[in-house]
Structure formats: structure tokens, C-alpha cells
Image: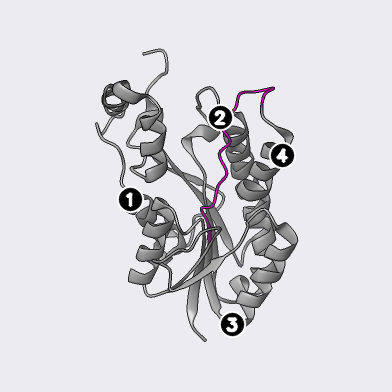
Amino acid sequence: MTRAVIITGAAGGIGAALCERMRQDGYLAIGIDRKPAPVADKSLQFDLSDSEQLVDLGRELARDYELKAVVHNGASQPIAQAGETALADWMDALRVNVIAVDALISGTRDNLASNDGSVVVISSVHARATSGGVTAYATTKAALEGWVRSAAIDLAPAIRVNAVAPGAIDTAKLREGFARWGESAEERKDVLRRRTALRRIGDPSEVAGAVSFLIGDDARFITGTVLVVDGGATARLGSE
């Protein structure tokens, strides 16, 4: 049976990098996204907010493959402030950002356990230090890290559970966010670089490398933790 890694949000910049890295590591990359994921070996178009169907999908994949890992990268990011986020957006963010990984594990748990498997979720620096206007996103990413700690205990010792928390990564979504600032976009990018200890924006491959480490044998005594990949941005006091 083919050894595989399930990757949600596989059509985006980080998702594509994850698919590429998993293939380099010798795994079949199974991508799940609302959009086609051309870099994945097997691309499944699926709505991550459909929790019950996601359990069934996990069971189907567990029947067909030896699963080394589930990497939950899919995310919903409503742009709205506290008290102004629509209920539908709140529910979508909760289902996609948090509940989706639990649903997938429900369907794949036995398979992962029999294959020394791992779960890695893509969190965000917004789980601990955020900005205005992304209340649902920041809240659900914080909840996702809480899930990691709890699941690491529940699924041990057979399955390890960890998170990677990226900072600013050069993806289409980040570029779209800067584009909203119009003529001041480049100036804001420069501010971001200056406030990052390594003085640059990250590359999606660097997030994928962190995930590769966490599901590999060199991390076999690591579970329940969050690996921050932000170039040192959150090491700086916000008051500086």
C-alpha cells in the first residue's frame, strides 16, 4: 500500500510547497482544497466546512493508503472586527480552521496509529500576537493550538501532534493583503522586513521544511508543541 500524506489547503502557496516537499520526502501527496491542487499527486476538491463528509473522506483514504501524516493547512480568514464578524463567517472559520482537522483524524486515526503517524497543523503568529480586523482568524488559530496540546495527549503514544506557526510568508494571499494599501504597499513591506529579525519575508518552502522535520524521525520525541517560523518577528516587543 502506498505511503501518503494528506494536505488540506493544498491549492495555496504554502499548500503547494507542502505537496512538493512531501513528494521529495517520498510520500504520495493527497491534496484537499475547494480548488484544484495541481501540485498534489491526488487532488480532491472538497469543502472543509463539511465536517461529517470529511470524516467519511478520511475513512476512504485510510482504506486506500498507508498514512504517514495529516497536515492541516486549510484556513478561512474573514476580514472583520470584533462584534462585526457575521455569524456565518464565524462558523465557517471554526469549521475550516479547527473542526476540519479533528474530523479528518476521526476517520484516519487507526491508520495513522499503525504507521507511526503524525498530525501537523499550520497555525499562525496571529494565535498569540495579532492585528485588528481579523478577530475570527486570530481566535480560531489560538483554538487550533489548544487542540494540538489536547490531541497530543489523547492520541499519544501512537500519534504525535504538533503545529507550525508561520509569520509573514510570501504567498498570493499575503500579496493581496499588501495590495489593499495601494501606493503605500511597498513602504509597509519595508516596515515588516525591518521589524523581522532576519530582515525578510519567509518562503513557503521554509514552512514545508518545518513540517517535514516534525513528521520525520528526528522529531520522534516531540509532540504537543508549536514551532514558530516567523524570522524572529514575535521575538520583538511590540512597544519597541
Instruction: Determine whether 192 is above or below 73 in the image.
Output: above
Instruction: Determine whether 139 is above or below 32 in the image.
Output: above
Q: Secondary structure at mark 4?
A: helix
Q: Are marks 4 and 1 in contact (CB under 8 Å)?
A: no
**From the image, which quarter does the C terminus lie in?**
top left
Q: Are marks 3 and 4 in contact (CB under 8 Å)?
A: no
Task: Identify which amino acid the numbered label 2 is placed on.
Answer: Val
Q: Please name which of the two marks, 4 or 2, marks the residue nearer to the observer.
A: 4
Instruction: Determine whether 196 is above or below 34 in the image.
Output: above
Q: Classify 10 Å Cα crowding around label 2: few (below 14), some (14-19), many (20 and above).
A: some
Residue at the outermost top position? 239
Q: CA distance from mark 3 to mark 4?
A: 34 Å
Q: Are marks 1 and 3 in contact (CB under 8 Å)?
A: no
Q: Which residues are magenta?
A: 71-84
Q: Which residue is mark 2?
A: 134
Q: Please name which of the two marks, 3 or 4, marks the residue nearer to the observer.
A: 4
Q: Classify 10 Å Cα crowding around label 3: few (below 14), some (14-19), many (20 and above).
A: few
Q: Secondary structure at mark 2?
A: loop
Q: Which residue is mark 3?
A: 64
Q: CA distance from mark 4 to mark 2?
A: 15 Å
Q: Position of residue 159 (x, y in %)?
A: 59, 64
Q: CA distance from mark 1 to mark 3?
A: 30 Å
Task: Identify which amino acid the numbered label 3 is placed on.
Answer: Asp
Q: Please name which of the two marks, 4 or 1, marks the residue nearer to the observer.
A: 4
Q: Classify 10 Å Cα crowding around label 4: few (below 14), some (14-19), many (20 and above).
A: few
Q: Earlier in the sequence, mark 2 or mark 1?
A: 2
Q: Which residue is mark 4?
A: 88
